[in-house]
Image (cartoon, rainbow, N blue to C red):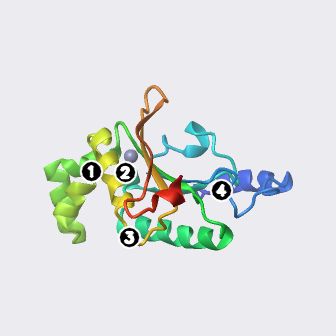
């Protein structure tokens, strides 16, 4: 049996009870979450994010990659169209976590064999590893804040989720983009 089948059963239940109703493309909470694809770090569970609540991008480690920067820039440009009066648009919340599987990329034997098998750059793979989430979340918050392609009306925060306690700790409170005009983020 295909592994997706039990989840498709849940979709039929979802559609039968009109679970999609009331969700809008305008999020209830203007937050753009960037976090790991680990099954333990689902924002629907640990942040209580419900349908229509916020935007979420998940990848290995919850890293701010060029693709993620492009997505934030794109959503920022769309939001500027929707909210033309000035003022803040949304907050990007980067959330790294403890016991991240990307730590395997810090282990040389695995990284080397994976790099030689796939052709991915070994230094880039090593840089993707989240072994110290308090440190990598700082790096990634700065990556967003320094991106000139992202609207100056976006703010950025950084957090670490502990998979053992279930608690989220804020490492960087919501901060303006480096190129933001002070009046726009007030
Ligand atoms: Zn992870």
For residue 112, which numbered disc appears in the image?
none
Which is more toward the observer, 111 or 177?
177
The disc, 4 or 2, on the residue closer to the chain's N-terminal end is 4
Residue 57 in the image, given as x and y percentages of width and height: 50, 58
Using the numbered discs, state the Cα–Cα distance from disc 4 to disc 3 in whole angstroms.
43 Å
Question: Mark 1 = which residue?
Answer: 129
The disc, 2 or 1, on the residue closer to the chain's N-terminal end is 2
Q: Residue furthest front?
A: 183
Residue at (41% x, 66% y) in the render: 69
Q: Secondary structure at mark 4?
A: helix
User: Do we see residue 170 in this rendering?
Assistant: yes
- Does the residue at mark 4 contact the one at mark 3 (Cβ under 8 Å)? no
For residue 148, which numbered disc appears in the image?
3
The disc, 4 or 1, on the residue closer to the chain's N-terminal end is 4
Tell me the mark number nearer the camera, choosing from 3 and 2.
Answer: 3
Mark 3: give few (<14), some (14-19) or many (20+) Cα within 10 Å.
some
Using the numbered discs, state the Cα–Cα distance from disc 1 to disc 3 in whole angstroms.
25 Å
Which is more toward the observer, 157 or 8?
157
Examine the rendered structure and indicate whether residue 132 appears above or below residue 127.
above
Note whether ligand 1 is within 8 Å of mark 4.
no
Q: Secondary structure at mark 1?
A: loop
Residue at (60% x, 70% y) in the render: 80
Using the numbered discs, state the Cα–Cα distance from disc 2 to disc 1 in whole angstroms.
7 Å
Question: Mark 2 = which residue?
Answer: 61
Mark 1: give few (<14), some (14-19) or many (20+) Cα within 10 Å.
many
User: Do we see residue 36 in this rendering?
Assistant: no
Tell me the mark number nearer the camera, choosing from 4 and 3.
Answer: 3
For residue 5, which numbered disc appears in the image?
4
Q: Quadrant of residue 88?
A: bottom right
Using the numbered discs, state the Cα–Cα distance from disc 4 to disc 2 in whole angstroms.
27 Å
Residue 21 in the image, given as x and y percentages of width and height: 82, 57
């Amino acid at each position: 049996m295909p592994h997706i089948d039990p989840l498709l059963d849940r979709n039929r239940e979802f559609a039968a009870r009109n679970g999609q109703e009331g969700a809008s493309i305008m999020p209830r909470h203007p937050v753009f979450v960037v976090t790991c694809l680990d099954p333990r770090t689902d924002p629907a569970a640990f942040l209580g994010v419900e349908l229509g609540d916020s935007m979420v991008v998940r990848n290995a480690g919850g890293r701010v990659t060029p693709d993620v920067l492009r997505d934030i820039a794109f959503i920022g440009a769309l939001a500027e169209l929707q909210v033309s009066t000035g003022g803040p648009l949304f907050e990007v919340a980067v959330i790294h976590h403890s016991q991240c599987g990307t730590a395997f990329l810090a282990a040389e034997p695995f990284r080397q064999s994976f790099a030689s098998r796939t052709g991915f750059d070994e230094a880039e793979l090593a840089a993707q590893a989240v072994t110290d989430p308090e440190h990598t979340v700082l790096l990634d918050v700065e990556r967003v804040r320094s991106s000139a392609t992202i609207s100056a009306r976006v703010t950025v925060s950084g957090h670490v989720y502990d998979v053992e306690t279930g608690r989220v700790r804020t490492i960087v409170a919501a901060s303006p983009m480096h190129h933001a005009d002070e009046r726009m983020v007030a």
